[in-house]
Image (cartoon, coloured by chain):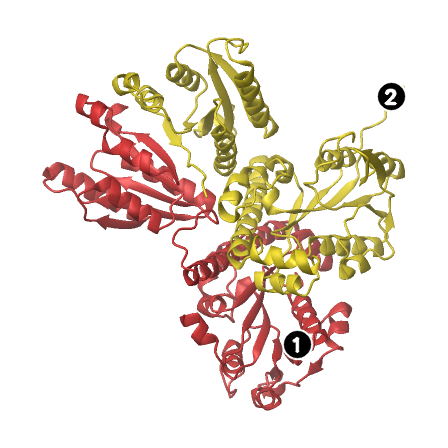
C-alpha cells in the first residue's frame, strides 16, 4: 500500500550497480536509455562523465544531452546537474551517471543523489549508475579489501529505495584487460564482486518480501536460508551456536536464536540460560525470548514467521518411559516442523 | 615415439541467468564478438535463436559449425556436432543452453558432456545456463514456482567453471520483454506471465542466482588460499584437513522417493559447508538380492543419482538399520547424518523407538539432520 502511494506522481529510480569502475555500468545505463527512446519514451542525459570509450560515446551521440553547469572551485572546473534546466525540460526519463558525486560548494544540493531525489519528486524517472565502493555504510568492509575509503558516498538507504536495481557483472580479468593492474587486484576485485552480488541479493530479497506482502503470501521459503538455534538450559549451546554461526557465514544468511522462558528454573539453570543467550548475542545471532506454555508450538510459530529453513535443536539422552509412550517435545517438534530441516545436536552431558 | 602432449584444458566460462529472456545468449555472443575482433578464432557450436531478432543480429560475422541432424521416432532433431567442432578445432566455441538433454541416439546424453569433450581438447567454451537447472535446487524451485525442472545439471559441472558471469535484468524489465513478445510468441508469453514469470518467482530466482554466483566466487577465493598459504604459515607434515575438523555429511538412502530430496539437499549443504559427502543404503545383504526387483531397481537408481552428483556411495550390510548407519558413520568420521522422516508408527516402534530415535540415541556426538519435506 505504502509503496503504491509513494509511487503516485513520483518518478521511478533504477540503479545499475557495479563492483568496480570499468565493469560497464555507464554503457548499460545508456543502452537502457537508447532502448527506452526507441520505444517512444522521452529520454535525456542529465550527466555523463567526459572520459568515455568509443562504444559509450556512440550511445551518447544518439541521445539528447542537457548540458551541466560548470562551477569553478579553486583552480578546477566541475560539472554539476543543471536541475533547473532539467525540471524545465521535464523529460520522462533522465540518465545520471556517477550517482556518488559530491557537488562543489555553492551548488543547489551538496550531493548528486539529492539532485536525483529532486528529479524523482518532480515525477521524472531516473536511471543511474553507481559503484559498490561508494555506498556509505559499506566503507569499513570495503576498506578491509581495498585499504581505501571512498571520499564521496551515497547512503545505503537511498540505494535500497530504488524501485529497480541491476547488477552489472563482468569477470575481473576483463576489467584488467581494459585497464591493466596487478595480480593482487584480481583477488580484491573478486572480493568486491562477491560483496556486490550479496548486496544486490539483499535488495532483491527486500523487494521479494514487499511483493509477497502485497499478495498476502504468508510463508515463502526457498529464496534464502535462515538458521534458528533453540536455546534450553541444558543444551550444548556453544556447539549449536558455533555451528549456527559457521553455517550462517557460509550461506550468507540470517542467524536467529530463540529461548522459550521456563518458569521455576533452578538458579543454576537460569544462570546457564543467561550465559547461552549472551553467547548467542556475541556470535551475532538475533536473539528472541518468547513467553509460552507450549514451547514446541511457540518455536514453530516463530520459525514460520521468520521463514526459517534450518532449525537447530538439542536432545537429551534421558528417555523415560512416559516419553516413549506419549512422545517428548522434541519428537513433537520434529513431526510438526516438516517445512524445514531440523538438526539435532547432542547435549553436553552425553559427551 | 613420444605420445602427443595432451592439450591444456580449455577455459570454461558460464553466463548465468535466472530465467529465459534475461539476455544470456546475447551476452555470450557479445563476448564472442569481442574476442573475434581481437583476432581470436571463435565459432558458434550451438545457438538457439528462438526467433529473437536482437540476439540473431549478434551472430553476424561469427562462423557456425553446422549442426548434426538425427532422426528419432520419425522426427528430425538437430544437435551440436561435437566431432565436427573437434575437427574444426577453434580456439573458442560458443555453446548455448548447457543443461540441454540430447535426443536419444546421440553419442552423449547431456550437452554438458559434449562441452567436456571440447574442453578436454583444449577448446575454450563460453556457454549459458539458467539457475533453475542446478540439480541441488530442483526441489526448492519446484516448491517455490510449482515447476518441476526436467533438464538438470549436476552442481559440480557449474562449480568447475573458470568464470561465472551473472546476466541480470530486473523482473519488471523481463516481464515487459515478454509482454512485447520479444521472448516468446504472444500466446505463450501470456501463459508464461501468469505462471512461471510472476514477479515473486522471478525475484526469488534472481536472488538465488546472485547468491549462487557469490558463493562460487567465495569458493574460488578459498581454493586459491588453500593452494597458496600465507607466508607466515608454519609448514606441517599433517594435511590441513585433519587439523581442522573437516565436516562430513552422510546421507541415508532408502526406497522412498524422498531419498532424492535428501540427496539433493545433502549435496547442497555439503557444498556450502565444504564438507565431504557420502551416501549409504543399509541392507541385509550387499548384493541387494533380498529386495524385491522393484525395490532393488529403486535403490540402485537412488545410488546412481547420488554418484552423478559426485557423492560416494556404499551399501552397508546389516540387519539393524540404525546400528548400521551409526557404526558406518563412526568409522568414517561422519559429523552429520542426513535422514528422512520416519513414517510408520507401529507398536514395535512405540517400545523400541523409531529408526530416527534410535539413530539419535546411538549417534552420541554426531548431529542428525531431518530434511524438510517439500510440498506445495
Q: Position of residue B115 (x, y in %)?
A: 74, 37
Residue B238: percent from the left, percent from the top? Answer: 50, 24
The count of marks equals: 2
Quarter of the image that includes the N terminus of chain A? bottom left
Quadrant where the C terminus of chain A sits is: top left
Colour displayed for chain A in the image of the structure: red
**Disc 1 sits on a residue from what chain?**
A
| Viewer-side residue, B176 vs B303 | B176
- Numbered tag placed on residue B89 in the rendering: none
Relative height, residue A64 to residue B50 (above, below): below
Q: Position of residue A75 (x, y in %)?
A: 61, 85
- Relative image position of residue A28 (x, y in whole percent): 67, 66
Where does label 1 land, which residue? A48
Q: Nearer the viewer, mark 1 or mark 2?
A: 1
Secondary structure under the numbered disc 1 in the rendered image: loop
Res A213 quadrant in image? bottom left
Amino acid at each position: 500500500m505504502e509503496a503504491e502511494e509513494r509511487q503516485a506522481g513520483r518518478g521511478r529510480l533504477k540503479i545499475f550497480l557495479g563492483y568496480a569502475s570499468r565493469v560497464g555500468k555507464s554503457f548499460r545505463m545508456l543502452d537502457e536509455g537508447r532502448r527506452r527512446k526507441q520505444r517512444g519514451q522521452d529520454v535525456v542525459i542529465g550527466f555523463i562523465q567526459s572520459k568515455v570509450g568509443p562504444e559509450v560515446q556512440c550511445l551518447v551521440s544518439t541521445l539528447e544531452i542537457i548540458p551541466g553547469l560548470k562551477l569553478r572551485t579553486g583552480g578546477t572546473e566541475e560539472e554539476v546537474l543543471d536541475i533547473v534546466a532539467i525540471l524545465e525540460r521535464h523529460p520522462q526519463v533522465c540518465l545520471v551517471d556517477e550517482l556518488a558525486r559530491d557537488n562543489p560548494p555553492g551548488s543547489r544540493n551538496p550531493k548528486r543523489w539529492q539532485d536525483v531525489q529532486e528529479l524523482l519528486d518532480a515525477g521524472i524517472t531516473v536511471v543511474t549508475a553507481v559503484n559498490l565502493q561508494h555506498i556509505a555504510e559499506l566503507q569499513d568492509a570495503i576498506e578491509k579489501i581495498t585499504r581505501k575509503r571512498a571520499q564521496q558516498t551515497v547512503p545505503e538507504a537511498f540505494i535500497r529505495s530504488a524501485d529497480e536495481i541491476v547488477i552489472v557483472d563482468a569477470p575481473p580479468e576483463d576489467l584488467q584487460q581494459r585497464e591493466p593492474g596487478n595480480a593482487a587486484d584480481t583477488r580484491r576485485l573478486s572480493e568486491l564482486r562477491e560483496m556486490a552480488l550479496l548486496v544486490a541479493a539483499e535488495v532483491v530479497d527486500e523487494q521479494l518480501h514487499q511483493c509477497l506482502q502485497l499478495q498476502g503470501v504468508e510463508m515463502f521459503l526457498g529464496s534464502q536460508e535462515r538458521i534458528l538455534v533453540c536455546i534450553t538450559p541444558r543444551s550444548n549451546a556453544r556447539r549449536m551456536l558455533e555451528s549456527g554461526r559457521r553455517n550462517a557465514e557460509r550461506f550468507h544468511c540470517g542467524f536467529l536464536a530463540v529461548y522459550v522462558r521456563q518458569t521455576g528454573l533452578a538458579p543454576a539453570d537460569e544462570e546457564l540460560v543467561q550465559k547461552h543467550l549472551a553467547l548467542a548475542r556475541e556470535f551475532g545471532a538475533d536473539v528472541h525470548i518468547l513467553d509460552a506454555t507450549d514451547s514446541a508450538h511457540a518455536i514453530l510459530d516463530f520459525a514460520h514467521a521468520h521463514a526459517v529453513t534450518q532449525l537447530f535443536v538439542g536432545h537429551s539422552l534421558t528417555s523415560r518411559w512416559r516419553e516413549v509412550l506419549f512422545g517428548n517435545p522434541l519428537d513433537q517438534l520434529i513431526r510438526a516442523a516438516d517445512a524445514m530441516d531440523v538438526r539435532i545436536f547432542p547435549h553436553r552431558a552425553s559427551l | 615415439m613420444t605420445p602427443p602432449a595432451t592439450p591444456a584444458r580449455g577455459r570454461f566460462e558460464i553466463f548465468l541467468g535466472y530465467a529465459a529472456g534475461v539476455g544470456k545468449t546475447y551476452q555470450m555472443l557479445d563476448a564472442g564478438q569481442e574476442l573475434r575482433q581481437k583476432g581470436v578464432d571463435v565459432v558458434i557450436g550451438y545457438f538457439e535463436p528462438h526467433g529473437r531478432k536482437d540476439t540473431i543480429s549478434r551472430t553476424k560475422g561469427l562462423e557456425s559449425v553446422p549442426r548434426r541432424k538425427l532422426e528419432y521416432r520419425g522426427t528430425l532433431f538437430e544437435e551440436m556436432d561435437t566431432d565436427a567442432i573437434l575437427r574444426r578445432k577453434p580456439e573458442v566455441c560458443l555453446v548455448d543452453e548447457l543443461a540441454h538433454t540430447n535426443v536419444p541416439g546421440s553419442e552423449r546424453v547431456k550437452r554438458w558432456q559434449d562441452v567436456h569433450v571440447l574442453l578436454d581438447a583444449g577448446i575454450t567454451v563460453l556457454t549459458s545456463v539458467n539457475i533453475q537447472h542446478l540439480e541441488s535446487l530442483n526441489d526448492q524451485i519446484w516448491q517455490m514456482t510449482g515447476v518441476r525442472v526436467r533438464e538438470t545439471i549436476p552442481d559440480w559441472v557449474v562449480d568447475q567453471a573458470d568464470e561465472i558471469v551473472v546476466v541480470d535484468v530486473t523482473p519488471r524489465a523481463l516481464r515487459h520483454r515478454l509482454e512485447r513478445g520479444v521472448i516468446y510468441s504472444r500466446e505463450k508469453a501470456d501463459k508464461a506471465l501468469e505462471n512461471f514469470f510472476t514477479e515473486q518467482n522471478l525475484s526469488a530466482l534472481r536472488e538465488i542466482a546472485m547468491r549462487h554466483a557469490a558463493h562460487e566466487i567465495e569458493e574460488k577465493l578459498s581454493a586459491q588460499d588453500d593452494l597458496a598459504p600465507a607466508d607466515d604459515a608454519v609448514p606441517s607434515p599433517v594435511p590441513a584437513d585433519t587439523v581442522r575438523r573437516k565436516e562430513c555429511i552422510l546421507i541415508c538412502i532408502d526406497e522412498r522417493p524422498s531419498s532424492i530430496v535428501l540427496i539433493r539437499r545433502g549435496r547442497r549443504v555439503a557444498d556450502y559447508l565444504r564438507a565431504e559427502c557420502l551416501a549409504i543404503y543399509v541392507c541385509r545383504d550387499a548384493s541387494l538380492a533380498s529386495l524385491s526387483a522393484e525395490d532393488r531397481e529403486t535403490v540402485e537408481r537412488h545410488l546412481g543419482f547420488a554418484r552423478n552428483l559426485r557423492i560416494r556411495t556404499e551399501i552397508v550390510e546389516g540387519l539393524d538399520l540404525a546400528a548400521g548407519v551409526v557404526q558406518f558413520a563412526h568409522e568414517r568420521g561422519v559429523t552429520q547424518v542426513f535422514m528422512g522422516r520416519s513414517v510408520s508408527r507401529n507398536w514395535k516402534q512405540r517400545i523400541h523407538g523409531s529408526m530416527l530415535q534410535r539413530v539419535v540415541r546411538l549417534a552420541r556426538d554426531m548431529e542428525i539432520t531431518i530434511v524438510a519435506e517439500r510440498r506445495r
